[in-house]
Amino acid sequence: MERCTATSAAITTREREVWSLVAAHLSNREIAERLFLSVRTVESHVSSLMGKLGLENRRALARHAVALDAGAPRAGQRWPAAASSFVGRDSECAALLAAVSAHRMVTAVGPGGVGKTRLALRVVKPFAEIRRDGGWFVELVDVIDPGMVMSAVAAAVGVVAPLDGSLAQAVAASLADSDSVILLDNCEHVIDAVRECVSPLLEACPSLRIVATSRIALRAPFEWVYAVPGLSLTHEGSNEEGDEGGDAATLFVERARAAGVEQGLDRRRVGQLCARLDGMALAIELAAARCPALGLDGLIEGLDRSLRLLRSDARSAGRHHSLRNAIEWSFRLLSAPDRTLLNTVSVFASWFDVAAAHAVAGADAGADRFDVADALARLVDNSLLLVAAGEPTRYRALETIRQFAAEQLAELGHSDAVHDSHGHWCRVQLAALAQQPRDDAWCERLDRIAAESRAALAWAEEHAGGPSAAALAELLAEQLLLRGKPEESQRCYERAAAMSVIDADGARLLRLAAGAAASRLVGNDTLRLLRDAATCAFAADDPGAAAQDLAWMVIFARWAPGIIAVLPDPKEVNGWLTLAESHGGGSTAAQAVIAVATAMGLANDDPRIAPLIARAIALARGAKTPLVESVARDQLCGVRMTEDRLADAVRETTRRQVIMDSVPLDASTAYHFNDYLLMASEVHLAAGHLRAAARYADQLGALACYRDYPHPAIARRIKVDALSGDFEAAVDGGNRFLAAWERAGRPISRNLNVTAYAMAMVHGLLGDEPQRARWIAVTHTLMLDPGVLATCASGWAPTFDALLELDRGRPDLALGRLCADIDDRRVWRVTAAASWRPWYAALWAEAAVLSRRPDATDRLERAGAATRENAIATAVVERAADLLNGHLGALPTHARTFARLGCAYQRHRTEGLLADPGVMGKKQDRVEIARPRSSWR
């Protein structure tokens, strides 16, 4: 049938009146009663209209009333006008449109304020425009009586209640062949009535589509549920929350600028703010409106009180006047038991499962797990909890809803009991985790429990803490250390000590905190915490324990200066030792620690040191303090190194390994494991045992306490790779080291500067000067006095510099860096220098040979003695001797020796020397030899 072309001039006023009521789907009798006409007269007007307009029937006449603006405009055809621009949500619009196109009944479900109505209007209005009969918007928020839902729909589509018969049937008849869409907005409070309304309409009207917005799914026939998410927190393709903030940050910035904010809208910080608001559109808009008065700093600081913070200044008391109103609307729809459960689970900081909810909320109330699970499902249905299906299924409240429920809990006077229950549950979970294997699944479980424990601790500290809170903090600290989070472990031990009511307990916890600090190589914190522990021990009337704390302070100051950024004055250290001696006489354990601390103050060549270490070992064994014996043997190991007795030093590391194998890994032992494995790697490196040095470095990396704090272990392995010539592994390790060091807060630990300079050497050997300069800068950062780097004459710095200069064919420059006499005991009396003496001596001799020094023969003889217990360094000296004597035929044998010893760099260097047999006869300053390659192994 052709579209009507009649003009309005051809239709009389009375016909227009009749036509408008036909469009409203009134019967002829109803029209006659409205216009005080006879039924016959109405029939005549209807017949005349169909003839003038060329229409076949009454239904077509009603449909085309809208097209010609003949009837009064239908209320439902007037879509709400947006008060502000629509931002982002491209993927959500596409997903909802696909659902509406594919399904006859779609419900957009989500919590209050997530943006359901705006999204539905954005999709449904243009969808209606392409339908033959358009669409209608039906606002149900003000419909209080469920019986009025059908009336609201009828009013929207223009159906007048019949004098006899059913309104539902009249609406169904009106829409029977209608190709249209109805948007029902805000259905949650009359959900049963909406379901009873739409089900018969969908059955009677095959071309009709219905879209609903609700905080609860309708559970109606044909229904397809689309869960409306919060605004995206990242840009498409990014996996990091807060990455420029996605649509959420875009909305905030646009609304904040509209409110008058011109500057200070850093996208990353805005993204972090929006992430804290879970991407909730209403919360973001309300926050942006307050940005001119509070700024980003004030908004971020006030997020813990977001229900009070995020409100509009409008006088309207509507649901979207504030977040509180929006949430309270949903809260009132719940049954009393469901309200109680929601209030109770507000203590959970993150995702929780049914077992956790039952333990905290259901057990004392007499509810079984099924009751709790059923109630949680209802809260999900009401968009008050998020759900993540899995094994097990987990639940979480959006932060704003959690805050609202927590307020309700407090107002009812139940906070203390529920939080106590939550804290007890955390302690039980942590205790159970302590007995389980520490694999990746364990880490995932601990991360969840740690989030809850942090929340429980924060609440406990705010409410005076107590022994149970201290116990929770200690349990959490123990597991965090084994999770590889020593910094947080240290803080938790300190918090536990602060909440402890017994001085002896406080002292014990502070010692554990000191151990955690040492494990992360922050020596100044270690000293501070040991001093605090001594103070508590004195208060507990335990002078022996206090003496041990003071003596351990001396040990760390003298034994581990490399982890102390700001070294204490030596006079202060001596004062600690004197105080320890004055209080430790009655304790064998204290005497053992004091003996070690005293020995630490002696030079390695002091004749008193060996008997003092022997006494310390005997006392430690008698007091059953294995860590003290371990430290004593470490010192003895250093003495053997300065005596050029590397084989004996290796044996001491083996004895130390036996000791450490007898103790568990925890905060009190973590640094000792670190040091034992570090020292074992260093000693084997000094002895030229590259494979053993790498094995100990890898064992250090495998310690559970360094799972998320790996840079100390990576640092040890880098030195081995650098000297062996595995430059590809060294570069990879360097990148990982820098990333981990940055994550750890760039701690200043001089134990790490040798690693940074080893990487500078590696990049120099690879010819990458920008990277070499970068690593030299890192080395400077890690040193107390960067000026020492270029001037020190012994140890690792000149060794690395000389190796690089020799590689570049500049033996004279290498010799200039190796200016210390290898037999000057004043230079090599310190363990840190002595460990590099064999490598240094070998290069010292080689540089003399390649520079054609007249004392080259004497140097070779002296270097042979200095390197006798390092097979690789010995081979370098022997190679230099063959070069000096012209025995080039021996070079292939040297190459095979280096290969057998695992030193690919020296093997290839030997092959390069063999390829240039005239090297010793050349007169130029630069000697050309083969360059190393990153592919060497």
Image (cartoon, rainbow, N blue to C red):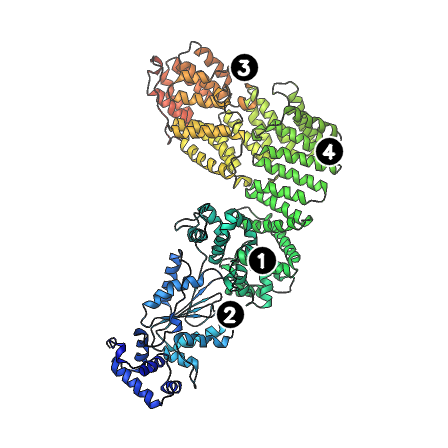
The number of callouts visible is 4
Q: What amino acid type is highlighted by mark number 2?
A: His
The residue shown at (49%, 65%) is 215
Q: Give the secondary structure at mark 3.
A: loop
Which mark is first along the chain, 4 or 1?
1
Where is residue 502, by image quadrant? Answer: top right
Q: Residue 455: x and y, percent?
A: 59, 51
Residue 501, horizontal then vertical, whole percent: 71, 45
**Screen quadrant of the N terminus:** bottom left
Question: Which dot, 3 or 2, sits closer to the camera?
Answer: 2
**Crowding at label 2, few (<14), some or many (≥20) Cα neighbours within 10 Å?**
many
Q: Which residue is mark 3?
A: 824
- Name the residue type under label 3: Asp
Disc 1 to disc 2, how far (Cα)? Answer: 23 Å
Secondary structure under tag 1 reads loop
Which amino acid type is shown beneath numbered disc 4?
A: Gly
For label 1, the residue is 346
**Tag 1: amino acid:** Ser
Q: Nearer the viewer, mark 4 or mark 2?
A: 2
| Quarter of the image where the C terminus is located | top left
Separation of marks 3 and 2 at Cα, in angstroms: 90 Å
Q: Is residue 618 visible?
A: no
Q: CA distance from mark 4 to mark 2?
A: 70 Å
Q: Are marks 1 and 4 in contact (CB under 8 Å)?
A: no
Residue 189 numbered mark, or none: 2
